Amino acid sequence: MKKLYFTIIFLFITRLLLAQNTTGKTVSVNFNQASIDIIVKELESQSGYHFYYDRTQFDSLKVTLQISDAPLERVLNMAFNNTNYHYAIVPANMQIFLTKGKIIHTQLAAGYFNSKGDIINQTPARGDFSMDKETPATEATTENKLYSIGIKTNNIEPGKAVLSGYVRDVKSGEAIVGASIFTTDAKTGVVSDQYGYFTITLPKGRQTLVVHGIGMKDTRRQLVLYSDGKLNIEMQELVYSLKEVKISADKVANVRSNEMGVNHLDIKSIKQIPAVFGEADVLRAVLTLPGVQSVGESTTGFNVRGGAADQNLILLNDATIYNPSHFFGFFSAFDPDMVKDVELYKSSIPERYGGRLASVLEVTDREGNKKNFTGSAGIGLLTSRINIEGPIIENKTSFILGARTSYSDWLLSALPQEYKNSEANFYDINLGISHQIDDKNNLYLTGYISHDGFKLNSDTTYKYGNKNANLKWKHNFSNKLFSVFLVGYDRYQYAVSSDQNPINGYNLNYNINQSNFKTDFTYYLNQKNTLDFGVSSIYYKLHPGNFEPYNNQSLVAPQIVPAEQALESALYFGDKYDITPDFTIDVGVRYSIYNYLGAQTVDYYAPNLPKTSANVVDSVTYGKNKIIKTYTKPEIRASARYNLNDDMSLKASYNTLTQYIHLLSNTTAISPTDIYKLSDPNIKPQSGDQVSLGLYRNAQANTIEMSVEVYYKRIWDYLDYRDGATLLLNDHIEQDVINTNGKAYGVEMLLKKTEGKLNGWVSYTYSRTFLKQDDPNAGELINNGNYYPANYDKPNDFNFTGNYRFTHRYSVSLNVVYSTGRPITLPIAKYVYDGAERVYYSDRNEYRIPDYFRTDFSVNIEGNHKVHQRFHNSWSVGVYNLTGRANAYSTYFTEQGGAINGYQLSIFAKPIPFINYNIRF
Amino acid sequence: MAFFAISCTKPYNPKVITTASNYLVVEGTINTGGDSTTILLSRTVPLNSNLTTVPELGAVITIQSNQNQSYNLVEKGNGVYASAALTLPATAQYRLSIVTTDGKTYLSNYVTPIVTPPIDSIGFTEISNKQEGSGLQIYVNTHDPNNNTHYYRWDYNETWIFNARYASFYITNGTSIISRPAAQQIYQCWGNSISTNIELGSSAKLTQDVIYQSPLVFIPSTSEKIETRYSILVKQYALSADAYNYFSILKQNTEELGSIFDTQPAKLTGNVHCTTNSTLPVIGYISAGTVQQKRVYINNSQLPNNWIATYPYDCEPDTALYKYPEPGGLYLNQVAIFLIPLTSTVIITTAITPPGAMTPSGYQYVDPQCGDCSIRGTTTQPAFWQ
């Protein structure tokens, strides 16, 4: 068809003559929003000329024109004024050719006889598509089609208009998050939000938008913007799914976006990182980012820029996950087949988030396929997983369900001797339902359940789990104002039980419950200002320990630490203000209000004395829901970006944060039975601030991204415990904890290559983190009140994560990690006490374990790439810890048979081969 | 396959920790219950030192009460200081005063003596599912009818009869092999060991002050401790909450490290201070009170028949002949060379007497660890043994 059309043009092109004033015909017309067919019919009947045109190219043309006895040429000029349409007249044959975009020259192109191809190439292409005229938002599915946005007029008023819409996957209908939409000159650009929604302000008239999305084919849209309007953009997935390692959705975002200290990882790059048991791990991928560290391999607790592990707000589809790890920390709680992407905010934390000091890790699951039933399954050495998704109502409602379970008992036989006779298992289930009520309203329901059970070679059984559910309603008031309302419930619980000794048998139950309400509004005030505002509220209810006899033989005294309640609310407002195209500031304030609520009995201590039971001066019992203590705190979130040139920008940010819930742990790694404590009259909220500065540069057509960020951070009132403190089942925990202040600083460098056969990133971080206890009322001070390095203070940290693609089916990945060993407290002297050698410890964290070095390697094999096959399968085969270096996880000195010996415990002391099989259907 | 043994523990010797240290270590309990108080003084040594401990000699130790009584301890040598048997009034508080030869004075905090309730029983259970295999778990039961004690510490002294792998019937007198006199038997010995772990128990979380089957020691079924007769003397000390805390940190710091969810080693602060230099660390916690003790015996006949002790050494008897044939029709007198000299350390077990012969043609002998139990114990029956 296309060819035929070209041929027709080609045949006639030699006979074209000059178009102006050649017909001598006059016509009278009265068009009101007339389509091309009406116009042509009218003009053909009045002039006798025959019109040649492609109807589909003109489907967005609407002409309003009233004129009498005007020359045909003038009528055509007026009708096509300000549009991309052109006409050419061949009076000899009484023919008029209407074209789009390309003017048909009435003379031969220069050099025509030498290079025919040129003309063919310049001929406007014609897409085959069908347009759904009922859809209010224009569905843009073809790149070369010209879309008319807004109420069409043949005269476009100068000025700006707002364009908004969704970016979706053409196949599944799923929202594409973080797609960047910008004009060809890259002067204006936005990024789609977590629902795939975008709003961009553009000059009216002819525009070309370029759209980039992770793992999607780049696309472009041509449009004529008449007034405010909508445009939905569908993108096609790249077929060879393992090809891309794009860390950032937005190639120019590195330089252009206002945010700093934000790392974005999509699941495709996460899946390329060789993982210890072959199963992609979200949190381990996060650990490859600059500024993120962990205390060791069997923990997925992570430390961001010197923050403690509990200072990270971990959100899975907006639900707070308190324990993000399974199976002693070897797995993270997030099912890799469900996760769409991960965003980590390290320095400029948006004002809509709060309640934690160090970072926000936002994990977003995919939405179900709205068009077809699909699914995938994966088989690994320790776990298997399956997920299915599909429409409930086609194009409106979809679901996605994922489940994962372990069969890991064989691994325990491979663990050190002391873990023999142990048991461990876990499962997790994710559910997501999304429903499009209409063009302006969407509902999202998500749920998550995880369960872990283990028994470490003793009679004590541990169980823990997360339960989360939330409902989100997204409502667009207009193109300029949209909102998200969320209600949710999050729970973390654990239980410990022991039944071997009938007298001492017990059950211990612990749980945290939080009910959330949150609303976020975004208002595009004008081209220069985007406002964000909203309120949020969290009601906490903690049961800090119910200790009960295991059965009626047990003499255990039931002990119930009274439940704690609190309400944490916040009001926030932020403005992103583009002062000039090159200078943008983003200023926000979050006002947080925290109420500690009854029923509760609170002890008050004499001021300026250590909090001990001897210094209790009063004990007050408060009734249910009575406000016992209120803390308020305005938090500042400010950032600025200045473009030095097109490829380079300078960013700065300053943040203050407050945290009202504290994790109390006396273990080095996060353990499942750590307890959380709410701030109360005796325990102040922790607070911190951070200033950071960064330089960003893109090179080689935005395929290489470089950044350098420096930061300095202060932390106040972080809780540490007294030596030998009892944290669990402690009615007076304030007597056993000490306020600690901290400081952290560092420089982070990141170099990323996003395209090409070789892609990946290299990061290097130099950072220090120090804590000190100098509260004169604390009693015994750690290290005499001087600064000491935190457990996760690892000054040098280097990471390389790379992927090389030989063909679309075969690629190899390599991961190299080096870091300084973490600080430890070593014995410096020994003595004999109670019949055995004992050790005397140094100041806390005075020494370090040996440096850490690890290399992982994997080969990824994709099945064939026929698009239309029933099953797509892929293999991942590799080796974790290729060099087999026995990295120390911890060192310890223990007495055996009366003598002291030093030991080094390595978790993965040998190369560990793995294999993983995935299938998609 | 390759997945096994992915984690490992190996020795770790950090580069020389240079901090020189010789802090005073004070160990013991002020015994108010009509017995003598024994205090052990020593000094810490650097971690890489070959010495395990350095006894502190020449110190002057007194027990002081807050009612101005004081009782002196006498140096017994090797860092041990003991008082006469004292019955101290339970209404007073007591502390220890130590003046070392370097002129420094150390004081412990005043502590209230705690009356230790008696041990109810010491029992044992056979356990078969332990990672070490089957064995004997010895436990202690106690209770305080006044519901007042809550915190307990135990130490123990084990004694057992064991045999050498081979009985020795002969001995050399330097010129010939003679029958071994009964007084020099080295086949049956008493072994002895003291507890090296800190054993603690608490009933603080129970409705009654009851300690039920608190484990003390686990003896593998293959241990020679239980091959004949075994005895354990358990001493029970009631503790204050503070003292219990001190001992549990000490236990945690040195016995319970090396797992994945390790607690951080904690700085140990006892209740002894140097008054001359208050920043000087002192190790030790001095509490006061009475001590209870109980001894039990366990016979091998009480234990499963299939529990067989494993001898700790590989033993294979050798033979020494008076006439060992050599090439060329010569003979070598192996007995004279290997067994008769008084410098010979081997143990002669039995004689080799050919059928019909009146005198032995030679002897079987073993290395000392296979024939002489006295290198690992004593042949003298302890005074208490029944």
Image: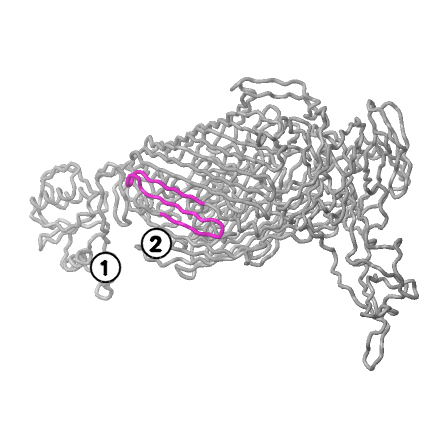
Q: Nearer the viewer, residue B140 or A190?
A: B140
Dot label at residue B359: none
User: Residue tagged by mark 1?
Assistant: A120
Which residue is more in the foreground, A75 or B3? B3
Question: To which chain does the residue with label 1 belong?
Answer: A
- The answer to which quarter of the image holds residue B284 is top right
Q: Is residue A352 above or below residue A191?
A: above
Residue B196 seen in the figure = yes
Which residue is located at x 80 percent, y 62 percent? B366
Task: Please provide percent x and percent y for residue A330.
Answer: 53, 47
Residue B319 location (% of width, % of height): 80, 68
Taking A763 as reference, is A79 left or right?
A: left
Left or right position of A531 against B90 = left
Q: What secondary structure is the stretch in magenta mostly built from?
A: strand
Residue A255 in sight in this render: no
- The reply to whether the magenta stretch includes residue B207 is no
Labels 1 and 2 positioned on one and the same chain: yes
Q: Please provide percent x and percent y for residue B246.
A: 73, 35
